[in-house]
């Protein structure tokens, strides 16, 4: 399992992903689930992956190979983020066609999902949620964020805090608190956490962090959130019996 989050705000985009993968209770490993495609001044494209690791790695490798070989179309030549979503969708279906039937014979389902977002010069930032079948939806005013993987522990926090007018800094704190809550409740999500905050129209990634075990800021944030929650809870009015 994994946990990935993408937010679309008036001020830009926020992306975060954990790094834990596992194939059973005694087979844990770390793999980065965030892939950045960047040409400063032209485009920033971020891809967060969830699901079967072999499948997601194959899809990302196929996209990179298309870029390197200048195969048309590719992520560098895409005219819009919608075109980019179509390219990711095509790559997902190509890997499924190659591997899916062989996995099915062993009763293993092809399972790869993505959060895709970014900005290409000439259009506003956009954010998409890619499903296993290759279809996708786009974030809107009513739905300004997407999650994949182990979503249930972090979702209530994001629902109560995030609006389209939330600042990038506040959104980053909220996302990290949602990861802290998820880590506290689910062993299948683990550090390091990769984070990107992308200011609208910057066309360059300037705010990127990785939080590993024992990171001072992340530990302090989680501690203060826990203490603050308990203080607020203690001030709630008692039930009138």
Image (cartoon, rainbow, N blue to C red):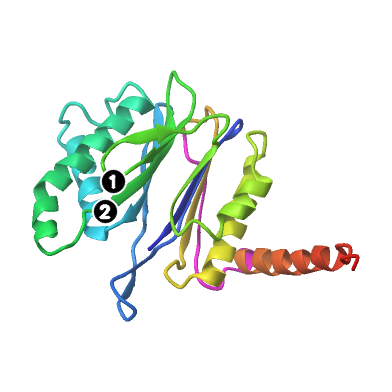
Task: Indicate whether 142 appears above or below 193.
Answer: above
Per the rendering, the mark at residue 111 is 2
Q: Quadrant of residue 215?
A: bottom right
The crowd level at tag 1 (other Cα within 10 Å; few <14, some 14-19, many 20+) is some
Marks 2,1: beta carbons within 8 A: yes
Is residue 88 toward the left or the right of residue 185 in the image? left
Q: Position of residue 54 (x, y in %)?
A: 21, 58
* Residue at 19%, 40% in the rendered image: 93
Residue 82 shown in magenta: no
**Quadrant for the N terminus in the image:** bottom left
Task: Indicate whether 143 appears above or below 224.
Answer: above
Per the rendering, the mark at residue 225 is none
Q: Residue furthest front?
A: 241
Foreground pick, 78 / 228: 228
Q: Residue furthest bottom?
A: 26
* Residue at 31%, 30% in the rendered image: 84
Q: Which residues are magenta?
A: 204-217
Q: Is residue 39 visible?
A: no
Q: Secondary structure at mark 2?
A: loop
Residue 211 shown in magenta: yes
Q: Spatial distance from mark 2 to mark 1, Cα to Cα? A: 6 Å
Is residue 147 toward the left or the right of residue 88 in the image? right
* Residue at 32%, 81% in the rendered image: 26
Between disc 2 and disc 1, whose residue precedes? 2
Task: Indicate whether 81 appears above or below 148.
Answer: above
Per the rendering, the mark at residue 132 is 1
Q: Secondary structure at mark 1?
A: loop
Task: Indicate whether 145 appears above or below 216.
Answer: above
Q: Is residue 52 visible?
A: yes
The crowd level at tag 2 (other Cα within 10 Å; few <14, some 14-19, many 20+) is some
Foreground pick, 123 / 210: 123
């Amino acid at each position: 399992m994994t946990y990935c989050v993408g937010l679309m705000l008036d001020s830009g985009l926020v992306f975060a992903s954990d790094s834990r993968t596992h194939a059973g209770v005694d087979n844990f490993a770390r793999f980065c689930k965030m892939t950045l495609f960047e040409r400063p001044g032209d485009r920033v494209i971020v891809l967060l992956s969830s699901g079967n690791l072999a499948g997601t790695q194959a899809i990302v490798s196929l996209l990179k190979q298309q870029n390197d070989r200048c195969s048309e179309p590719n992520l560098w030549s895409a005219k819009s983020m919608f075109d980019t979503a179509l390219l990711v969708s095509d790559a997902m279906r190509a890997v499924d066609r190659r591997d899916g039937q062989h996995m099915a014979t062993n009763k293993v389902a092809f399972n790869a999902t993505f959060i895709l977002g970014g900005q290409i010069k000439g259009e506003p930032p956009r954010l998409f949620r890619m499903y296993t079948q290759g279809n996708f939806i786009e974030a809107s005013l009513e739905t300004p964020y997407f999650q994949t993987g182990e979503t249930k522990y972090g979702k209530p926090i994001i629902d109560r805090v995030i609006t389209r007018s939330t600042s990038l800094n506040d959104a980053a704190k909220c996302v990290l608190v949602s990861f802290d809550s998820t880590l506290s409740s689910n062993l299948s999500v683990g550090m390091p956490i990769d984070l990107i905050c992308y200011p609208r129209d910057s066309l360059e990634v300037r705010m990127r962090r990785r939080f590993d075990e024992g990171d001072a800021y992340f530990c302090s944030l989680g501690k203060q959130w826990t203490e603050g929650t308990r203080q607020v809870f203690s001030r709630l009015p008692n039930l009138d019996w």
